[in-house]
Image (cartoon, rainbow, N blue to C red):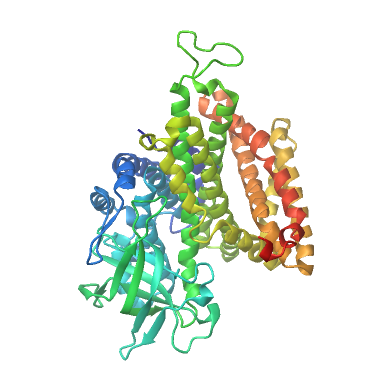
Amino acid sequence: MPQYKAPLRDIQFVVHELLNADKAFAALPALQEIDKDTINQIIEEAGKFASEVVFPLNQTGDKEGCTRHEDGTVITPTGFKEAYQQYIAGGWPALSCDPEYGGQGLPQLLNSVLYETLNSANQSWAMYPSLSHGAYECLHAHGTPEQKKIYLEKLVSGHWTGTMCLTEPQCGTDLGILKTKAEPLADGTHSITGTKIFISSGEHDLAENIVHLVLARLPDAPKGTKGISLFAVPKRLANADGILGENNKVSCGSLEHKMGIHGNATCVMNFDGAIGSLVGEPNKGLNAMFIMMNAARLGVGIQGLGLTEIAYQNSAAYAKERLQMRSLTGVKEPEKAADPIIVHPDVRKMLLTQRAYAEGGRAFAYWVALMIDNELNHPDEEVRKDTADMVTLLTPIIKAFLTDNAFTATNEGLQVFGGHGYITEWGMEQYVRDARITMIYEGTNTIQSLDLLGRKVLGDMGAKLRKFGKLVETFIEEEGIRKEMQEFIDPLADIATKVEKLTKEIGMKAMMNHDEVGAAAVPYLRTVGHLVYAYLFARMAKIALANESSGDPFYTAKLATARFYFDKLLPETATLIRQARAGSKSLMAMPADLF
C-alpha cells in the first residue's frame, strides 16, 4: 500500500530560508500581517488534511472511477463528496481569494503549498477545487458586477465549482476552428449551443452548482481566434442574489474512459440552447480565458510536483526495505539474507533523480507563486511589471518541465519497485498513469515549448529572458568569489552562457526559416528549465553550506541532492543543446507520403 506524509521540513525550508516569505510579505500592504507562525500553521494543516482526509481515497477512487446515470448526473467515487464537505468546512477554497467575496486574502504561495499536498495525496480529487479556483480568478478579473455578485461568493466558499470549456471534437489547441454558437437573447443573455469534450469536473455530485466558462462564437464574429467570446454558463440558473432556480440546458453526454485520473469526471458536455452571460468584451474571450488557462498551467505544473514527491517517498521507503543481492563493495547487512536495494548505485540514481526533481520543482513553483503575490500586491508599479514579465516567461516552463520530470520520476519509481511496481496494489502504476496526462492537457508540452521560444523569448527579442538572466548573473557575481561555492557557480555560469548563445543562434536561423523554432523548441525549453533549476539549486546549496556545521542532517541531504543534480542531471543539457542546434533539416526532409 502507498504512503504519503507532507514534506513539511522541505516546504518550510523553501518558504522561509530560500524565499524569506515573511519578509517578502512585509513589503506588500495586503499581506504584511502574515507572519512565520501563521505560515507554518497553514502549511501543517494543509499537509494534515491532504494526508489524512484525501490520500486514503486515492486508490479506491482510481478503482471505482465516476459513474454516469441515464439522466446525465455523475456520482464521484466513495468518500469524495464527504472529503469535499470537509474541505469547505475548513475554509480551504477561500484561502487566497479576495476578502470582499468571503476569501481569506492569504498569499498565492500558500495556495501553491496546499495544492502540492493535495496533488500528492489524490490528483483526481484535487482537480475539482483547483478548476473552481481558476474560474474564480477569471470572473474576478473580467466578470461584470452582476456576475461577480452571483458567482464569486459561491465559488470562494466552494459551494459552487467551476470548469473551463474550450476543447471540441474537431479542435484542441487550434481554438480558431471551434463551432459552439452563442445567440443573443432579448434580455441581454445568450443561448449557447455546442459540444465540448475532455471537460474535467464537468459534472459531479460534490457541489450544488457548476459554473462552466465556455468559449463560443457570436453570429457576426470574425473567423479564427479573433472571433471567440467567453460566457458563464451555470448548470443551474440563479437570480441576481445567487439563489438557485431551474436546471439550465447543460448536460453530460458521456464520461471519457481514460488511462488515468479515474476519480475525476472527464465529460463530454452538451449545451443545447443553455443560458449564458458574456464575460468580458465580445470577440475577446481568449483574453479573459487566458487568466484561467495560465492559472491551470501553473496548477498542472504543481500536479507534476505532487506526483514527483509521492513517487519519491514510496520509492525511497521500498528501497530501504526490499532485500535483493549484495552490495558490489561488500556485504552491508550481514544479519539479513541480502542487502536492501538502496545499496546499489543505479537504484540510488533513480531515487536521487526523483528527489532532485521534487526539490527543484518545489523551489521553482513556490518562487513563481511568490512572484505572483508581488505582481498582485506590490505598491511599486515597476516591481509589479517586472514580476509579471517573469511569471509570463516562466509559466510554460513550469507546466512542461515539471510534468516531464514527473513522468520520469513516476517511471523511475515503478522501476525501483520492479515487478511489484507493475502490480496495482502497490500504487506506483497509478502514479505513472496519472502523470502521463499532465504532459498533454492545458496545452501539450510541445505547445508550451513553442510558446516559450516563439512568443515569450523571440517575440520580445529576449527582453523577458534577459530579466531572468540578470538575476542569474548577479548571483554568479556575488557568489563566484567564494571557493566553497565554485562547484555550483561554475556549471551555473556555463549553462547561462550557453543558453544566451543558443537563443541568439536560434533567433538568427528563425529569421530565414520559421521551422527552426518548431525544431528547437522542445529541447530549448528543457535547457532553460535546467538553467532555472541550476540557479535555484545553487541558491539552496549556499544556504545548506552556511548551516552545514549545525549537525542537522537536513542540510547534509540538501547538499548531497544539489551535488547529484549538477553531476548527473544538468549534463543532459549538452545533448539538448546539440539537438536544438541540429535544426529542422532532418525533420522536414522526408516527404509526408513516405511516413
Vertical comparison of 131 with 187: above or below: above
Residue most toward the front?
594
In this rendering, the count of numbered labels is 0
When asked about the image quadrant of residue 390, the answer is bottom right
Q: Residue most toward the top? A: 335
Kindly tell me whether residue 387 is visible in this rendering: no
Residue drawn at the location 44% of the way across and 53% of the way down? 32
Residue 500 appears in the figure:
yes
Between 126 and 73, the residue placed more toward the observer is 73
Whole-percent x, y for residue 575 in the image? 72, 45
Q: Is residue 142 left or right of residue 57?
A: right
Q: Tell me the quarter of the picture where residue 150 sits.
A: bottom left
Looking at this rendering, what residue extends furthest in the bottom direction?
A: 186
- Decide: is 153 above or below 522: below
The quadrant of the rendering that contains the N terminus is top left
Is 64 or 191 nearer to us in this picture?
A: 64
Report the front residue among 452 and 114.
452
Tell me which residue sits at (65%, 42%) in the image: 534
Q: x, y percentage for residue 538?
A: 64, 39
Report which quarter residue 446 is drawn in.
bottom right
Q: Quadrant of the C terminus?
A: bottom right
- The answer to whether 35 is drawn above or below residue 176 in the figure is above
Q: Position of residue 520 (x, y in %)?
A: 70, 57
Q: Residue at x 45, y 11 (%)?
A: 336
In the picture, measured across the screen, residue 569 lies left or right of residue 358, that is: right
Q: Position of residue 523 (x, y in %)?
A: 67, 52
